[in-house]
Amino acid sequence: MPPHDHPLWRPYTQMKTAAPPLEAVRTQGSRITLADGRELVDGIASWWTAVHGYNHPHIAAAVARQLEAMPHVMFGGLTHAPAEQLARRLAALLPKGLDHVFFTDSGSVAVEVALKMAVQMWRNRGVAGRTRFLAFRGGYHGDTMGAMSVCDPDEGMHRRLGGYLPRQIVCDLPRSPAEASALDGTMAAHRETLAAVIVEPLVQGAGGMRMHPPETLAEIGRLARRHGLPLIADEIFTGFGRTGSLFACEQAGLVPDILCLSKALTGGTMALAATVATGEVFEAFWSDDPGAALMHGPTFMANPLACAAANASLDLFAGEPRLDQAGAIAARLAEGLAPLSRLPGVRDVRVLGAIGVVQFVRPPDLAALKQRFVERGTWVRPFGDIVYLTPALTIGTLDLDHLLESVRGVVHETLSA
């Protein structure tokens, strides 16, 4: 029988065999302080969210002011300035045409809303039967039911739930003319049943930090347009400077029909997400028929505290050189990780923006790797066959060099063990 002294059920964790978690008591900049006094340099910015570092005073002050005025109010029938302002600012920053912002409270739900928008858009237009999605191998879009169904069904973390999930069309990313032709054929064969195509622009994050060039993304957009299929861009990981541009779609000159944001949206302070649609999508819901409305509304939708944090985060992108910092991090990651590419146990070393990845030939002992990183004073969370770094865009040179030294040391130790 399992023990009953674990009131906390932790994420992505086999509770029977996992080591006890480390207790964090404070954060600052790129560092996490533990209850025992140790300090760790955070190499992954708390699942890629803390782009400005922890505890940025501008964001903290904005949240404090909003907390005093109005921590929350329902968004059904009411509105408030932080949400109105944030929606206008996002529409101005995103690729031209993405003008209609629907707020939720997590990335997975942002994807759920995008899928729901696509299906209902067709039904509102009087087109039946378009209920499936085309997704890509290596993809990950979240942990809720619809989002899980468009993740990689064979290699992804949800493969054990295959019989429970809707069956979607899953293709290879079109990296070659032959793969582009195959994708073209698949879209043609399933066009009448597809509601949309969904892709993670430039980097498939939780699927293994798999990267593809802007040309591949542009080809997906071209084929989707050719077959009259809406394109959903999941920028939950890649949005807000992570790939070197504010949004990854920009590098391919791509304007998707629907775009999903979360993670770095509030600068890593609290939960908020957004599903942003073009006017063409929005117009399918603009009707005298109440049944044509988008029937979705999270209780904490457009939470004023989270919107205040997001507005403050956008202030920092506007007033501080975040994209220049991402470029500098990219150069340092490329230089610092390059020597590992020569090791026989390393399959690949790759860098895009403020993302650096070392991929092993064979999956390592992840528990041992994680412990080695902590012993070196760093917080790095390898998964599958990769070790990766996605630090805060504001990370200092000394902390970044410490992370790189730690990765080099742990990889050498692992391959020589």
Image: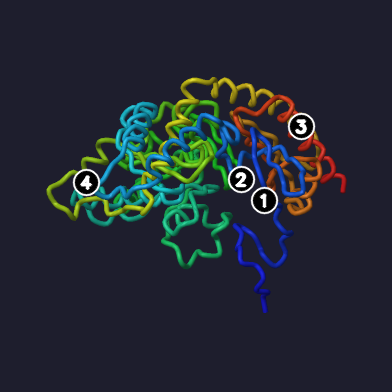
> Of marks 4 and 2, which one's residue comes earlier in the chain?
2
Is 45 rendered above or below residue 105? above
Q: Which residue is mark 2?
A: 208
Alpha carbon of mark 4 to alpha carbon of mark 2: how far? 36 Å
Q: Which mark is residue 402?
A: 3
**What's the residue at 34%, 31% (across, down)?**
91
**What's the residue at 44%, 35% (across, down)?**
65
Q: Which mark is residue 384?
A: 1
Q: Quadrant of the N terminus?
A: bottom right
Q: Residue furthest bottom?
A: 1
Q: Which residue is mark 4?
A: 285
Q: Amino acid at mark 1?
A: Gly
Q: Position of residue 66 (x, y in %)?
A: 42, 38
- Nearer to us: label 2 or label 3: 3
Q: Amino acid at mark 2?
A: Gly
Q: Secondary structure at mark 3?
A: helix
Marks 1 and 2 close (CB-CB < 8 Å): yes
Q: Position of residue 138 (x, y in %)?
A: 55, 47
Name which quarter of the figure residue 8 lies in. Answer: bottom right
Q: Amino acid at mark 3?
A: His
> Of marks 2 and 3, which one's residue comes earlier in the chain?
2
Alpha carbon of mark 3 to alpha carbon of mark 1: how far? 23 Å
| Frontmost residue, 168 versus 240 | 240
| Frontmost residue, 307 versus 360 | 307
Q: Position of residue 40 (x, y in %)?
A: 73, 40
> Of marks 1 and 2, which one's residue comes earlier in the chain?
2
- Nearer to us: label 4 or label 3: 3
Alpha carbon of mark 1 to alpha carbon of mark 2: how far? 7 Å
> Of marks 4 and 1, which one's residue comes earlier in the chain?
4
